[in-house]
Image (cartoon, rainbow, N blue to C red):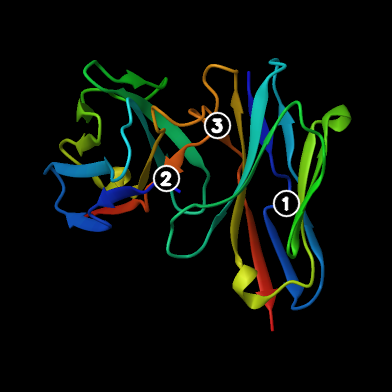
Amino acid sequence: GAVVSQHPSWVICKSGTSVKIECRSLDFQATTMFWYRQFPKQSLMLMATSNEGSKATYEQGVEKDKFLINHASLTLSTLTVTSAHPEDSSFYICSARDRQGPNTEAFFGQGTRLTVV
Amino acid sequence: AQKVTQAQTEISVVEKEDVTLDCVYETRDTTYYLFWYKQPPSGELVFLIRRNSFDEQNEISGRYSWNFQKSTSSFNFTITASQVVDSAVYFCALSEGLIQGAQKLVFGQGTRLTINP
């Protein structure tokens, strides 16, 4: 299957700093990528839909100015957590669909564990 | 609105026992997709199965089997002869629409399965 790579796998940052997480489709092009957040022992919740060349679409309750999403190419989307606070500590995971593949597959990255201290 | 319910928060069984994880979903759409994912402690999501709403045929893959019942809006997952390596959190998920396909997923709360030696 197609490979989606996230970087970094884990990151620890100080409160008030910004952290950038990358999501790359390694062997396919993805016009759309999705960012999910998972708090400890909870389910995955969709944060936003990242569209190549246009603005991201955010789910209700997600602050777009705090979670900046950039989808500058068909293989890369980035999520920047700005002015991070301890409550932003979570597991962030992206998924991507192959634009030329069947409309039934979404491939997940390995996730990024963010800890804000 | 879409909703996925996994009523079993945690299940613990002894190795070699069979175990069934329940999943009930709600959707107004006639075309939708159902998924099961495994999330080991490392965090990545491991794809197990995808089923579209037009295919009610049950599926077996090794020790895994799935029972899709549209009449009860359920998509249950059974592990036969469980093994310690099956210990993980299992998520049932739903996506709607022929056009959207597998792009945006709504996840259930997850079931933490522990297989004891």
1 and 3 marks on the same chain? no
Residue name at image x 73 percent, y 45 percent: B7
State the CA–CA distance, disc 1 to disc 3.
Answer: 27 Å
Say if residue A66 shows up in the picture.
no
Say if residue A47 shows up in the picture.
yes
* Label 3: which secondary element: loop
Amino acid type, callout 1:
Gln
Task: Specify the quadrant of the image occupied by residue A33.
Answer: top left
Q: Nearer the viewer, mark 2 or mark 3?
A: 3
Q: Read off the chain for label 1.
A: B
Residue name at image x 60 percent, y 18 percent: B97
Amino acid type, callout 2:
Phe
Q: Read off the chain for label 2.
A: A
Residue that carries the numbered disc 1 in the rendered image: B8
Judge left or right: residue A5 versus residue B53.
left
Residue that carries the numbered disc 2 in the rendered image: A108
Residue name at image x 61 percent, y 68 percent: B87
Amino acid type, callout 3:
Thr
State the CA–CA distance, disc 2 to disc 3.
Answer: 13 Å
Judge left or right: residue B34 versus residue A72.
right
Residue that carries the numbered disc 3 in the rendered image: A104
Q: Which one is nearer the viewer's eye here, B24 or A50?
A: A50
